[in-house]
Image (cartoon, helix red, strand yellow):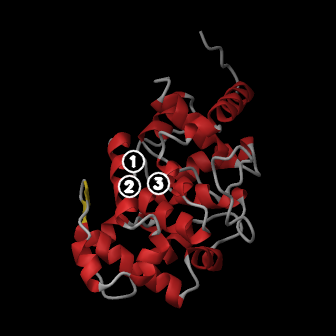
Amino acid sequence: MLDITTLKDIKDFLDEKAFAYNQPFFIAHDPISIPHRFTLKEDIEISGFIAATIAWGNRKSILKNANQLMDKMGDSPFDFVMTASSKQLKSLEFVHRTFNSEDLHCFILCLRNIYQKHGGLQQVFEKNAQPDSMQMAISKFKALFFEIPHLQRSEKHVSDPLKGSSAKRINMLLRWFVREDKQGVDFGIWNGKLQANQLSLPLDVHTGNIARKLGLLIRKQDDAKAVQEIDAVLRSFDPNDPVKYDFALFGLGAFEKF
């Protein structure tokens, strides 16, 4: 039986689990496998953003739908986003749970605007990042993303932590792009002005439940306040790389049923 009696015991346990799961084998069954199909920075960004957007529900379904969409985009998601005609967009059919073809078409045009008018995803997040947090940057990104005419229904697919959301999917995306883990899982392609110590835990049902079982999280809702609470603990464990513990908490919940 696991003997964890002190906060140091928990930290040592999670350090061990973070190292165990932050390994290449993690990629194949995770949405991060979608951007790992590509080498061009912009392809990684676009495919990663779309994969993260639909990353809820059954993991096999997420991967199947995201991979099929990359195929439909000719395995060149950035080129498709930037050059697809109205006819091509209309013929692009897609559905994952409540995210449908109309949402996808809207997202493609919003992404095109981000790259044409704002220098791309990275520059948007860099511009609005705070020294110790990305949550303001996420909120600003949503506002900028939907600055062009768009479907109102599509707004629900981009979360805003300043309105109480845990913003799990964008926090996960930021982990992928900012954090350089040297294990070949997270990309670290944005680790210039942005650093891992600014990141927040992608809080979901798995990471939240395990954090509560370990006594690291008291708040019952998986919301922005809970993210702040668990962030404070994880940053005390590792001020430079707090979100490495995402691997540990998620792995314990999803794979080990801890």
* Amino acid under disc 2: Ala
Q: Mark 2 points at which residue?
A: 66
Vertical position of residue 206 compared to residue 160: above or below = above
User: Between tags 2 and 3, which lies in front?
Assistant: 2
* Amino acid under disc 3: Lys
Number of residues whose C-alpha sits closer than 10 Å to that of mark 1, classed few (under 14), some (14–19) or many (20 or more): many
Q: Name the residue under label 3.
A: 168
Vertical position of residue 118 compared to residue 15: above or below = below
Q: Do the residues labelled 2 and 3 touch (CB within 8 Å)?
A: no
Residue 155 numbered mark, or none: none
Quadrant of the rendering where the N terminus is positioned: top right
Cα gap from disc 2 to disc 3, whole angstroms? 18 Å
Number of residues whose C-alpha sits closer than 10 Å to that of mark 2, classed few (under 14), some (14–19) or many (20 or more): many
Assign a secondary structure to mark 1. Answer: helix
Residue 63 numbered mark, or none: 1
User: Between tags 1 and 3, which lies in front?
Assistant: 1
Cα gap from disc 2 to disc 1, whole angstroms? 5 Å
Assign a secondary structure to mark 3. Answer: helix
Vertical position of residue 118 compared to residue 169: above or below = below
The residue at the point 53 percent across, 67 percent down is: 43
Q: Residue 101 at what x, y percent from top left?
A: 24, 68
- Left or right of 245? Residue 68 is left
* Outermost residue to the top: 1
Q: Are marks 2 and 1 in contact (CB under 8 Å)?
A: yes
- Left or right of 10? Residue 67 is left
Cα gap from disc 1 to disc 3, whole angstroms? 17 Å
N-term-proximal mark, 1 vs 3: 1
* Outermost residue to the bottom: 117
